[in-house]
Amino acid sequence: MVMGHGGGGSLSAELVEHLFAPAFRNEVLDGLGDSAVFALGGARLALSTDSYVVRPLFFPGGSIGDLAVNGTVNDLAMSGAVPAYLSCGFILEEGVALELVGRVAEAMGAAARAADVVVATGDTKVVDAGHGDGIFVNTAGVGLIPDGVDIGPRRARPDDTVIVSGSIGVHGVAIMSKREGLEFGVEIESDTAPLSGLVAAMLAACPDLHALRDPTRGGLATSLGEIAAASGVGVRLAEHALPVPETVANACAFLGLDPLYVANEGKLVAFVPPEHADAVLTAMRAHPYGREAVAIGTCVEEHPGMVVSATRLGGTRVVDMPLGEQLPRIC
């Protein structure tokens, strides 16, 4: 086991495919989406869980508490669900200040109220000093999927328009700059945010959204690669259309990173039927978390399962899945 197995790239995919999936094999898990989708008592529900081990605990624009709520809310929203209830598990290291735990809990409560979800149950464990890293948080969430909504990574189709909701790479650079004490001339703040309201606005414009993903670990490149592989389509990006802020581009150049692989916590990528793309973009740009939404590419029949990018110089490059993670401990 290496750190890259938790980085959201190809090592993570291999771990799931060859170790966890065979152990837990069932038709719900086989979907391998951001959340599990299943029927219960006549309703279609989405269920998701995630663990947060970010360092530092507080960073420009957010904290581990915000991430724990928004991350699970967003995973539910990527299946079209309306998030409703969360659980919260704290794993605390012996010696951590109760004031610090309280600050994280307050941040989680504020984020839950902003996302209109209820933290309904939880658990606390304490581990020996030296056997943790201050505070780890796990959240699970459940939400209701409206009738007629069918969103999943296997539904992308040729000619779909690929849309991203705004600037990419912001969260990962914010974490790295804080962690390493780097100065880029202006403070870069995390984009952590709950996206369920944005998804509701998109569904109102187009109930037949094909696929959604919030590009967290592994960045936009990983999310696109996973959807391309699951649906058997190719994805062709226009490099000039990628919304990379100048501050992020400069930071990535300094650090030797590619913004396509840097984590986001308040952005989504959507695969939309081409006849509805303009309406979806209009709806997204009318929402606070989608004002910078832009079409960045299309799905094609060529090179199924592969993502390529048309460069500014007229060439084409393959956008591979990362092996592990460029920036450790970003969520």
Image (cartoon, helix red, strand yellow):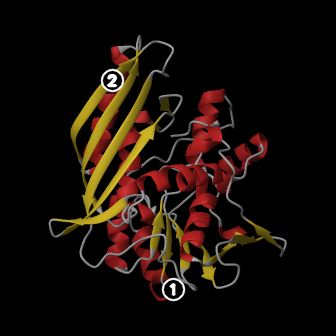
Identify the residue at horizontal 44%, vertical 84% (top origin).
276
Q: Nearer the viewer, residue 2 or 319?
A: 2
Residue 298, given in percent of the width and then of the height, sits at: 61, 79
Q: Is residue 113 visible?
A: yes
Q: Is residue 168 visible?
A: no
Q: Nearer the viewer, residue 330 or 276?
A: 330
Q: Secondary structure at mark 2?
A: strand
Q: CA distance from mark 2 to mark 1?
A: 49 Å
Q: Tag 2: Cα neighbours inside 10 Å, few (<14), some, or many (≥20)? A: few
Q: Tag 1: Cα neighbours inside 10 Å, few (<14), some, or many (≥20)? A: some
- Count of numbered badges drawn on the protein: 2
Identify the residue at horizontal 34%, vertical 34% (top origin).
107
Drawn side of residue 224 relative to residue 61, left or right: right
Q: Nearer the viewer, residue 263 or 137?
A: 137
Identify the residue at horizontal 50%, vertical 74% (top origin).
271
> Within the image, what quadrant is residue 238 found in?
bottom right
Residue 64, given in percent of the width and then of the height, sits at: 43, 34
Residue located beneath label 2 in the image: 125
Residue 69, given in percent of the width and then of the height, sits at: 35, 43
* Residue 31 in the image: above or below residue 58: below
Residue located beneath label 1 in the image: 274
* Residue 19 in the image: above or below residue 276: above
Q: Amino acid at mark 1?
A: Pro
